[in-house]
Image: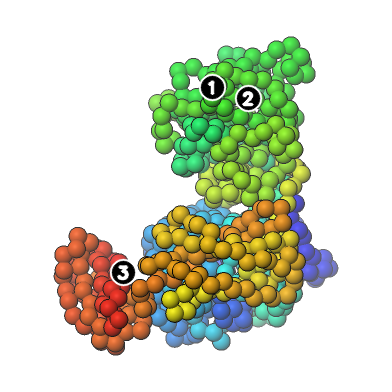
Amino acid sequence: MRKLYTVLSTCAFLTFAVPSFAQHQALNLIGGNYVESPTSTLNNGDFTIEFWAYVDSTAIDGSPHQFVSIGDANGNGFYIGYDATGEMLAGDFMLQNFIYTGVQMPKNSWTHIAMSVNSSTFAAILYLNGTPVTNGFVSFNDGELFRIGAQVTLTTDPQFAKAKIDDLKSFSAMRSSFTIRRDMFTDPDPADPTLRAWYKMNDNGTHTLDNSSTSNPTNDGQIFGDGNSTGPVPSTYWTWSPISDSSNALLFDGTAKSQVIIPDSAHYENILNSSTGGTVEFNFNATTLPTAPSFTTVLNKFGQFGIMMNTTQIAIDNGTASPLVYTLQPGDLPNDVVPTGEWHQMTFVNDPTGPVTHIYYDGMFFADISGALQAPQQNLTPLTLGITKDTVNGDLQPFNGAIDEVRLWSSQLDPLTIFNNYDKTLSGTEPNLVSQFTFNQGISKSDNTGMITAFDQVAANNGTLQNFALTGATSNFVSHALSIIPVPLPVTLTKFNALRNGVQGLLQWQTAQEENSREFVIERSADGKTYTPIGSVPAAGKSSQPIDYSFTDLTPINGPNYYRLRETDLDSKYTYSIVRVLNFGESSRVTWYKTGHLTAQIVYLRGNNESYTLCDISGHILRQGQLSAGKAGVSNLPAGVYVVRVVTRTGDALTTKLFLY
């Protein structure tokens, strides 16, 4: 269960006429209202900002709109929003750094947006629903106002947002992908020293937007836009929000063919076809079940594997012509039928050596089906919950009832593990756990409009809800409480830097707090994909004070060196830090900035008059010349991808790709 921290007394809401949804509100930005708060909302150093946003399809109206920004009236600032076409973007005006994501802002759905920024390199990563979608470089001027719902150029080009915003948090540290994904719905500790601002948006009343951070409590926001700074704000500035961390399940309506569509993943292609086998688990509460020979589908990856049931049979589909069926025997279950109207759990362990599939019911071994949950070939179909998506015959065998805690593993779980965990929500850090869908979101049997993402707690391979009413008691989120296996308290990493120290690599990091930490394992990669441990540093174990650590790589490899920390706790659970890169053989970094339509500027950050070459993607030289004060303009070329090569004074050749558009 999530931790709840009450920092505003209930009576604080009684001064005003408050609707019944006061504890589940969002700020409604209607194209003219906005919020301002002090600059210290964002740290002048590494920081992460994250929030929930809902954009109606009508808000993609040919004009840019900004969710958040910080800067001055001259446009020297940082922002996150979307452009006139609806493409998500972020950037700054100060250094003309713009991150074009190529990703459309999701419409008519609640979306979690986060950006983590390294202050020393300006490197930024943008996350959408816990998944990194792009990276680039941004910066901002400290000492300026922070805004929600407007651009920094407020007086000349405000770019007011048309969106609902909820649960905005700002941290003075870079947060990892796992941490962002894990905490999307979770309330932070208000006393967390890295928490700079936390706007719950439950402030339907005056023009003050309360900052619930107790470590930095002065950063309240002020709401503007109605020409009145003292009286109650217009009721249109507030709206209902389903953003909530809850012990819920997902209720499928068999008649409406409600379903969850999860994109294919390499993990799903291999999970049940390798020599190691795999495991599928889920909780279910059937409202009704068909009688044999008809079936209803709980989970399916058409052409590869699926799990189905009716009142007296449990079946698996392994991509062959007919399902493999186990018919209940007398005494298997009470009344000799699969029960309806009550919660139970099933586990299917794929053993390809048989081949056989072992079935467990409520944590206990139940039966074997001769044949394995595997397909003869990969077919790239999506994983679906509550439906079979037959590529020829359409949607078949819809499930009528609730599904919860769907888990897929790339290993065969042993009987003891199955029994210990069948009635629990896992932490998401368990070895060989490929995907976990807990559905612990939304508000039970309430208005969850726009809550259409099924969040994968492990790999962020999120699914999409289709044909759910998301209002009232049917086709919606419903309450289902399970025991929680807590996520181990993370090491709060406030700094992680990599520096060249002659021919050696110096790694430095700092923690703000530690709980049950054992060690930091330093891992290095030459390609950013395959990592190898190169050393370890003992951790403090438990601390609430800043602690500095360092490690020296005495023999870095020639070329790029990708470094990450594996933060391991006392019971061997672990998570990874962000990645830092050092390049040995390079003197510095070559980058470029878009300066207009089909124009850009090459920048060698430590350069002077070095020679450079511009080639097309095939390697044909298009231009050669010398930099001027480390810069060179590029224009009069068609849109496309180009390669820039700069030769430094030490003879190193630096290259980067340049995109003209």
Per the image, the residue denoted by label 1 is: 355
| Tag 1–tag 3 contact (CB < 8 Å) | no
Residue 96: image location, x then y, percent: 38, 78
Q: Quadrant of the C terminus?
A: bottom left
Asked if residue 128 can be seen in this view, the reply is no
- In percent of the image, x 58 and y 49: which residue is there? 458
Front-most of residues 257 and 374:
374
Does dot 2 land on a helix, a strand or a loop? strand
Q: Quadrant of residue 14?
A: bottom right
Determine the CA span between mark 3 and mark 2. Answer: 52 Å
Per the image, the residue denoted by label 3 is: 656
Does dot 1 land on a helix, a strand or a loop? loop
Q: Which color scheme did the rendering employ for the protein?
A: rainbow
The residue type indicated by label 1 comes to Pro
Front-most of residues 497 and 480:
497
Q: Check disc 1: other Cα within 10 Å, few if <14, some if 14-19, many if 20+.
A: some
Front-most of residues 438 and 618:
618
